Amino acid sequence: MKYEVLCRGDALSGELADRFHRLAGERGLIRSATEPDVVVSIGGDGTLLEAFHMFRPSLGRVAFVGIHTGHLGFFADWKADELEQLVACMADSKPDGETRIVRYPLVSVEIHLQSGDRIAHEALNEVTVRRREGTLVARVDLNEQLFEMFRGDGFCISSPIGSTAYNKSLGGAIIHPTLESIQITEMASINNRVFRTLGSPVILPKHHVCDIVPNPGQPLAITVDHLHFHRDDVVRIRCKVSDGKVSFIRYRPFPFWQRVREGFIQNGKEE
């Protein structure tokens, strides 16, 4: 098995990365920065987001696994003191063993510019669209039909696995990551006698599209996970469920709802 490690850069994560390489070499694992089978993220959820975008062109053949070195990471299955166990699982894994690959849907975003050019990205967690200053004014089309005229702070378009991130803080629903969907959640929409939006999150299935069409000339701030873009030449932003998926390698069960419970409710402890 070929692997690569991406670590957060703090002292603990760096130390764990060095130990991982040593143990992996002893167990016959091969380090490959260009063609890994498994990418190991050591740090937090932000580290795994960086790993995802670094290896996004190779999503069809790369699987991810995370070791968290701070608070419980939503993407990370393993703790710092379990590093040796993870290396052993990777070295001993067999096609007919307990190793399981789970594949989760992503957000596809295509930014159409006044020049006619298009910028395409995929998000593991979410895409956000705001005006850099003031109120965003935009038309929202669903499946190329007018849905609403929006005035407010902006939008969060999240994947199912990203529904537990920024989307949750905006009041969006938590969606099981096996459901092929995206969620569009408004940020502080203006609703009064003059202006009206739905005001509730909208969940779209695969093959449905959401187009955000800002009034011309608005300076926009767009994020794709941790990536930031400032544009004032956007004509349309099209969001949908991506045709590609992200793969996580599971060497032991860690059910999604258990992650939610431990992350948000009881931190794994009984009251």
Image (cartoon, rainbow, N blue to C red):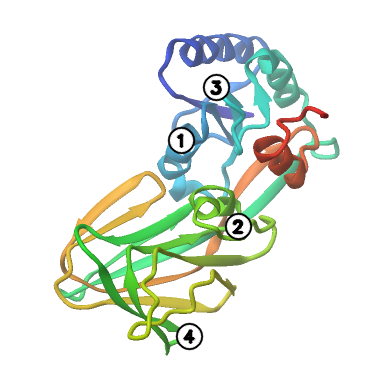
Q: In the rendered structure, which disc, 1 or 3, sits on the residue that comes first in sequence?
A: 1
Neighbours of disc 4 within 10 Å: few (<14), some (14-19), many (20+): few
Residue in the picture at 49% in, 16% down: 13
- For this orientation, the residue located farthest to the bottom is 145
State the residue at coordinates (16%, 69%).
233
> Could you tell me the amino acid type at mark 4?
Asn
Q: CA distance from mark 1 to mark 3?
A: 11 Å
Q: Amino acid at mark 1?
A: Gly
> To which residue does mark 4 refer?
143
Residue that numbered label 2 is attached to: 160
User: Label 2 sits on what residue type?
Assistant: Pro
* Inter-mark Cα distance, 1 to 4: 32 Å
Residue at 50%, 9% in the rendered image: 15
Sequence-first tag of 1 and 4: 1
Mark drawn on residue 46: 1
In this view, 40 is above or below 229: above
Mark 1 near mark 3, Cβ–Cβ under 8 Å? Answer: no
Which residue is at the front of the view, 36 or 181? Answer: 181
The kind of secondary structure element at disc 1 is: helix
Q: Position of residue 214 (x, y in %)?
A: 26, 75
Q: Secondary structure at mark 4?
A: loop
Asked which secondary structure carries label 3, the reply is loop
Residue depth check, mark 3 versus mark 4: number of the one nearer the observer: 3
Q: Quadrant of residue 97?
A: top right
Q: CB of mark 1 within 8 Å of CB of mark 2?
A: no
Q: Which mark is residue 70?
A: 3
